[in-house]
Amino acid sequence: MKINLGGIDQIARIVVGLALIGLTLAGVIGVWGWIGLVPLLTGIFKFCPAYAMFGLSSCPMKNK
């Protein structure tokens, strides 16, 4: 698993994930808000399987 998320992408995913989960827990949105786990986990682990599948990377470093 190579890192394929850059800093801004990583922070945005974590913020969106936490926001969706928070809104779900607050009862503002329905259970679909638990989908926020996906961007949260991809942001934490700095790896997006969809990016890997399509050969994309937002990471400024070269993967070795």
Image (tube, grey):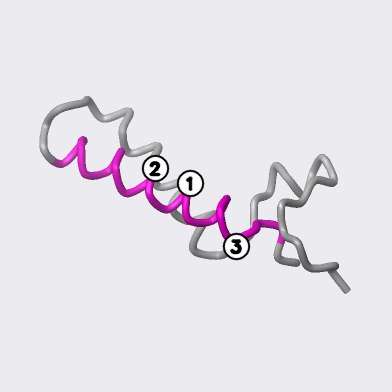
Amino acid carrying label 2: it is: Val
Q: Is residue 19 magenta?
A: yes
The residue labelled by disc 3 is 46
Mark 1 or mark 2: whose residue is earlier in sequence: 2
Work out whether 31 lies above or below 12. above
Mark 3 or mark 1: whose residue is earlier in sequence: 1
Is the C-beta separation of discs 1 and 2 under 8 Å? Answer: yes
Residue placed farthest to the bottom in the image?
Answer: 64
Work out whether 64 lies above or below 24. below
Give the residue drawn at x 79%, y 44%.
Answer: 53
Amino acid carrying label 3: it is: Lys
Is the C-beta separation of discs 3 and 2 under 8 Å? Answer: no
Quarter of the image where one finds residue 7? bottom right
Amino acid carrying label 1: it is: Pro
CA gap, disc 3 and disc 2: 15 Å
The residue labelled by disc 1 is 39
Mark sitting on residue 16: 2
Which one is in front, 58 or 2?
58
In the rendered structure, which segment of residues is drawn in magenta? 4-25
Q: Is residue 27 magenta?
A: no
Label 3 packing within 10 angstroms: few (<14), some (14-19), many (20+): many
What secondary structure is the stretch in magenta mostly built from? helix
Which one is in front, 35 or 14?
14
Give the residue drawn at x 75%, y 62%.
Answer: 60
